[in-house]
Image (cartoon, helix red, strand yellow):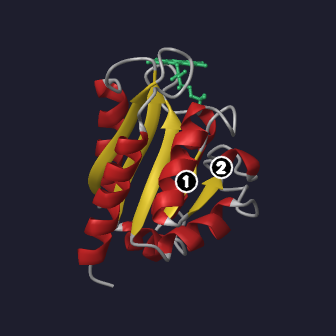
Amino acid sequence: MLALFASSRRDGNTGRFMDQIAHELGIEVVDLARLRISPYDYAHGNRGDDFEPLMQRILAHRQVIFATPVYWYSVSPPMKCFLDRISDYLEVPELIPQGRRLRGKRAYVVCTSVCEQPPAAFLAAFRETFEYLGMQYSGVAHLNCEDGDLPPAHEAQVRAFAALVSSEGAGDPT
Ligand SMILES: Cc1cc2nc3c(=O)[nH]c(=O)nc-3n(C[C@H](O)[C@H](O)[C@H](O)COP(=O)(O)O)c2cc1C
């Protein structure tokens, strides 16, 4: 299991929430903003950047967590950039067979915002993207950070989400 994290600050609300979940699960958090992943290019002239090596790592896992704050009802810019680049795996002939390996993987969303619930459009974009890729949307963990910080007593949510993810992973075929 691997977590892909992207925010405009590493140690902000989403980063700390994701780190707590990752600590419970004993998994690595990859900070997309620290990698060289350039925007989608129709000519695929950017194939030498960090995107394909990262995808190779992702393809070795059965469960992938996507962690991002809600910025204007949507994901953070490095997360959007990453999602756009998945198109390479649907278009570049030698990558297409690899892209098919996303099918069946479990996908989770970890997010923070300043609302009670993540916006419907935000979650729908993830759900529909996962569905298009044949991935199985398997859950979301969200914290309302309206006071500027992680809310008090959120540790129960960290543990509950980690327990859900571990129990589902245990039942998946290898
Ligand atoms: C540029 C920007 C846009 C935001 N847009 C929204 C929004 O549409 N809905 C919302 O509930 N919160 C919004 N927020 C608040 C953040 O989602 C919230 O503060 C979050 O916890 C920040 O996480 P971070 O520390 O990882 O950046 C926005 C914050 C910023 C900086």
Quadrant housing residue 170: bottom left
| Residue 104 versus residue 159 in the image, above or below | below
Horizontal side of 31 relative to 128 (left or right) equals right
Callout 2: few (<14), some (14-19), or many (20+) C-alpha neighbours within 10 Å? Answer: many
- The residue pinned by badge 1 equals 4
User: Residue at image x 67%, y 31%?
Assistant: 8
Q: Residue 62, percent across and down?
A: 39, 72
Q: Residue 14, percent across and down?
A: 55, 36
Horizontal side of 20 relative to 156 (left or right) equals right
111 or 161, which lies in front?
A: 161
Q: Residue 78, percent across and down?
A: 63, 40
Name the secondary structure under disc 2: helix
61 or 56, which lies in front?
A: 61
Residue 170 visible somewhere in the drawing = yes
Mark 1 or 2, nearer chain start: 1
Q: Amino acid at mark 2?
A: Leu
| Residue 19 versus residue 144 in the image, above or below | below
Is ligand 1 less than 8 Å from the beta carbon at label 1?
no
Mark 1 vs mark 2, CA separation in Å: 7 Å
- The residue pinned by badge 2 equals 32
User: Residue at image x 33%, y 85%?
Assistant: 174
Residue 104 visible somewhere in the drawing = no
- Residue furthest left in the image: 171
108 or 135, which lies in front?
A: 108
Label 1–label 2 contact, CB within 8 A: yes
101 or 1, which lies in front?
A: 1
Q: Amino acid at mark 1?
A: Leu
Horizontal side of 5 relative to 132 (left or right) equals right
User: Residue at image x 65%, y 49%?
Assistant: 32
Is ligand 1 less than 8 Å from the beta carbon at label 2?
no
